[in-house]
Image: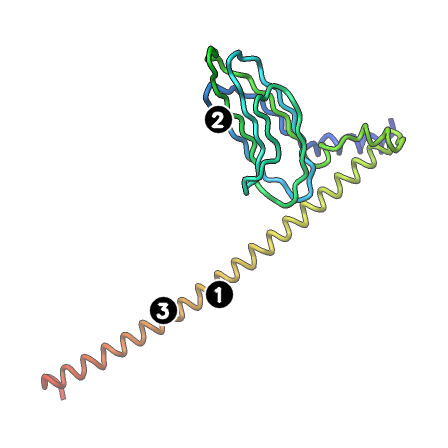
């Protein structure tokens, strides 16, 4: 294995974007997981639940607008995949319900989610395009580089938005402060003139 191949492999390992979770779900309980994902990103998931007679678990994947991206009524084991249309917060919910004669035991849930480069099947790509292992790693590295560039572009746009918001807020605060000072100055001037007329009317001053 040459040095270039080693570097590519290390980069691929360091840039893994996999969320593997394992937790327990009690009967008649609902658990949700949320994650922010960028636009035009492939997301894949694989789940497996332990057996629990008399229990049915509903798994649903939705976005922040309530659109259902995946729905499984009696989830036991399976996979799902979708591509994001915009930057959004996505939610994976599992809800366990007891049925007649069910046992009140916890179900062990294993959930693995991948998005971006790690969600792509480079094995299938290599077979389809007849790529060599090094060429596959180069393609993976190319996708990783594009993902990093997209992240930097997004961070830069967010930084510009925050800077514009801060500048706008600063300008509004400054204008409001000037307006408040003018109001206070006008009120103080009116009080002085009013009190002067009042005291003159009472002949307390000339």
Question: In the figure, 4 relative to 145: above or below?
Answer: above
Q: Residues within 10 Å of mark 3 (few under 14, many from 20)?
A: few
Of badges 1 and 2, the one in the foreground is 2
Label disc, if present, on residue 171 of the rendered structure: 1
Mark 2 lies on a secondary structure that is strand
Query: How far apart are the two marked residues, 2 and 3, measured between alpha carbons?
Result: 51 Å
Q: Nearer the viewer, residue 10 or 46?
A: 46
Who comes first in sequence, dot 1 or dot 2? 2
Q: Which residue is mark 3?
A: 180
Residue 19 relative to residue 195: left or right: right
Q: Residues within 10 Å of mark 1 (few under 14, many from 20)?
A: few
Mark 1 lies on a secondary structure that is helix
Query: How far apart are the two marked residues, 1 and 2, measured between alpha carbons?
Result: 46 Å
Residue 48 relative to residue 171: left or right: right
* Residue 54 in the image, given as x and y percentages of width and height: 51, 13
Q: Nearer the viewer, residue 84 or 103?
A: 103
Q: Which residue is mark 2?
A: 30
Of badges 2 and 3, the one in the foreground is 2
């Amino acid at each position: 294995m040459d040095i270039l191949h080693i570097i590519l492999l290390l980069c691929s390992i360091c840039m893994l974007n996999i969320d593997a979770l394992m937790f327990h779900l009690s009967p008649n309980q609902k658990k949700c997981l949320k994650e922010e994902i960028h636009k035009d990103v492939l997301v894949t998931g694989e789940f497996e639940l332990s057996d629990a007679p008399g229990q049915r678990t509903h798994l649903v994947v939705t976005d922040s607008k309530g659109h259902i991206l995946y729905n499984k009524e009696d989830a036991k084991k399976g996979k799902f995949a979708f591509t994001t249309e915009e930057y959004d917060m996505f939610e994976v919910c599992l809800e366990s319900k007891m049925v007649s004669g069910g046992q009140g035991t916890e179900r062990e849930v294993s959930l693995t989610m991948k998005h971006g480069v790690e969600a792509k099947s480079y094995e299938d790509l290599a077979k389809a395009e007849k790529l060599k292992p090094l060429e596959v790693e180069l393609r993976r590295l190319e996708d990783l580089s594009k993902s990093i560039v997209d992240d930097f572009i997004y961070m830069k746009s967010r930084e510009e938005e925050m800077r514009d918001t801060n500048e706008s807020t600063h300008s509004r605060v400054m204008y409001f402060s000037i307006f408040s000072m003018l109001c206070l100055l006008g009120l103080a001037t009116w009080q002085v003139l009013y009190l002067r007329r009042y005291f003159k009317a009472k002949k307390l001053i000339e």
